[in-house]
Amino acid sequence: MRNTKTKPNYLATGGLLIAATGWGLIWYPYRLLQEAGISGAASTFYTYSITVLIGLAIFARYLPQMKGMFGSMLWLGLAAGWTNLAYVLAILDGQVMRVMLLFYLSPLWTLALAHYWLGERTGPLGIAAIIASLAGAFIMLWQPASGFPLPQNSAEWLGLSAGVAFALTNVLTRRAKQLTLQAKSLAVWCGVTLVALLCMPILDQGFVMPQAIPSGHWLMIIGIGAALMITTLGVQYGITHIPVTQAAVIFLFELVVAAIAAYWLAGESMDMREWVGGILIVAASLFVARAEKA
């Protein structure tokens, strides 16, 4: 009995670690595409379109089983759509680690959703997580001139909103027990593609026609699409088999990968105040995971 329970947890943890590594690095090729004149929304649309095509080819035999699941898939897809699009747009124009730390306030929003939507009580550790999250955000965002601890630019606002949508996506994933792994994954891929297409005119993100994209950049787009398929499968499998708040702690590995990548690839680093705020935000995720086990 013990071995049968341990194996799925190892697989789920491995899937989340692969996904965290992928998302800690994927900002860089998106920046290369932006430098080539392909907007964030357009590159998101094309990369996830590739993922949808690959997914449909692989999961074709599962499509009949998805009848009657459209409603759940739609809401999951819209939440995941904004999560991924906002994250990409934020990471293109903002400082990588600041955007990611704002994104990783998501355990705070998870607690709020669980409390008000699912009726779950917030215990002492949950309250400690809320305090640590807010303190970390205050320290990182506080500006002596204005006195208001708010995101400094549109990229940071997008990163913050992506974290809220990520918390919603995780809760919806756990609630939608009737959805198979294949249905959840297709919902995410189709949702991101749809949201990116709809948001292009709203966000004034130019659309690049397929024939205007050089073959070398198409290879990059296809590579990103394949990587996104793997990360999504890892996330959906992991979230399905591991509690949301425990998975949030495993996702923190993304910050380690991103910090190293941002330093070596973009020459970005954080000052002491940002490090202190970031540590408190990470500590909040650990509090949430401890509360989940209690």
Image (cartoon, rainbow, N blue to C red):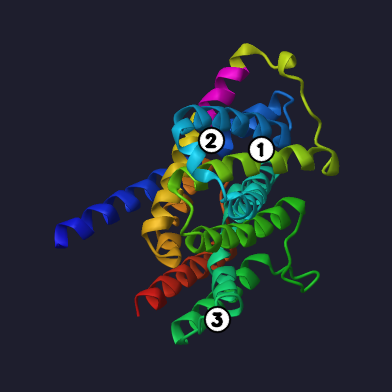
Secondary structure, magenta segment, majority class: helix
Asked whether the beta carbons under mark 2 and mark 3 sit within 8 Å of each other, the answer is no
Residue type at numbered disc 2: Leu
What residue is drawn where x is 80% and y is 69%?
145
Q: Marks 2/3: CA distance?
A: 44 Å
Answer few, some or many: residues within 10 Å of disc 3's Cα (few below 14, many 20 plus, some between 14 and 19): few
What residue is drawn where x is 70% and y is 40%?
194
Q: Position of residue 143 (x, y in %)?
A: 73, 68
Displayed quadrant of residue 19: top left
Q: Marks 2/1: CA distance?
A: 28 Å
First in sequence: mark 2 or mark 3? 3
First in sequence: mark 3 or mark 1? 3
Q: Quadrant of the C terminus?
A: bottom left
Q: Which mark is residue 193?
A: 1
Residue type at numbered disc 3: Gly
Q: Position of residue 51 (x, y in %)?
A: 55, 32
Question: According to the image, label 2 marks what residue?
Answer: 265
Q: Which mark is residue 119?
A: 3
Residue type at numbered disc 1: Thr
Q: Position of residue 4 (x, y in %)?
A: 19, 56
Specify the segment rendered in magenta. Answer: 217-225
